[in-house]
Image: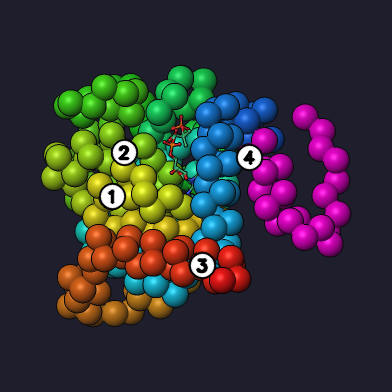
Amino acid sequence: MTFITIPKNHPRAKSLKVRETISQSFSDGVVVSSGLIAHGRGEAFDYILGEKTLPVTMTAIRAAVAELLLYKSVISVNGNVAALQCKNIITLANLTNSQIEINLFYRTEHRIQKIHELFKKYTDNNILGTDKKYLVKIPELQSLRRFADKRGIIKSDVVFIPLEDGDRAESLVNIGKRVLTVDLNPLSRTSKMSNITIVDNIMRAIPVMILECRKMKQLPINDLKKILSDFDNENQLNLILDHISTRLISLSNK
Ligand code: PTJ
């Protein structure tokens, strides 16, 4: 696919560049067509939030990093996450000693292979979710996301599921996992079902998590546990909704 060059001084250049990346990944078979729609919904929420990482979101980011540093964790990646943040996911996984597992809503062997190849370009780490002999089904989950790796998600304490659907978030919580997510929509079921929701664009959230992780790695275990116990996801989502309400009122110039 060829694209018209985006002028560097275009006011929406950054956002258009991300669109270009995700469209190209659709052509490459990494992203599914619904992934483009999901991206558009994300953009709409990002516009409303103000397209920056909110100070209040730093609390969720630090709590999520604390979880990844403290417990046996898996970062679950889908097509959109692979397309937009592949290299940074590898960095975050290395820093937190987490495994990476591919898990797709629109699961096909072809897409698994494409996403696997993409990760293998940048890492020698074992990418889970790719070898059928290790896959088992998560009970009660009907979608193709039910296939989870015995060595990864099944064994883990914490599953980080950026850009997810609510059903799996709920099923993972039901089987006793701690669930972390990145979702621009504070009203989604995933946001509400997860233990820690980072309401931010994945393009900003993962790089900020990496920065925080580099700082927090030096902290004693009890400090990390305190960051976690101080965090309340319901309160976090309420604060985000407060921010949106205040922002929209101020924009209406009333
Ligand atoms: O690759 P697959 O087959 O696993 O499919 C992936 C998608 C994303 C298509 C699938 O998981 C899906 O349909 O997800 P949903 O239910 O549309 O949820 C995705 C959520 O991510 C929505 O709440 C979006 O607002 C949000 N979102 C989209 N883009 C971003 C985002 N959140 C953060 N950063 C983004 N860039």
Q: Quadrant of residue 176?
A: top left
Q: Nearer the viewer, mark 2 or mark 4?
A: 2
Measured as percent of width and height from the top left, residue 89 is found at 47, 52
Residues at badges 2 and 3 in contact (C-beta under 8 Å)? no
Q: In this view of the protein, which residue sits in the foreground, 196 or 67?
A: 196
- Residue 155 horizontal side relative to residue 236, left or right: left
* For marks 1 and 4 on the same chain, the one whose residue lies earlier in the sequence: 4
Q: Which residue is mark 3?
A: 249
**CA separation, marks 1 and 3?**
24 Å
Measured as percent of width and height from the top left, residue 156 is found at 22, 46
Query: Looking at the image, which residue is at 31% across and 63% down?
Result: 238
* For marks 1 and 3 on the same chain, the one whose residue lies earlier in the sequence: 1
Measured as percent of width and height from the top left, residue 165 is found at 36, 37
Q: Is residue 6 above or below residue 114?
A: below
Could you tell me the amino acid type at mark 3?
Ile
Query: Looking at the image, which residue is at 21% across and 51% down?
Result: 178
Q: State the mark number for residue 166.
A: 2
Q: Which residues are magenta?
A: 1-23
Q: Nearer the viewer, mark 1 or mark 3?
A: 3
* For marks 2 and 1 on the same chain, the one whose residue lies earlier in the sequence: 2
Label 4: which secondary element? helix
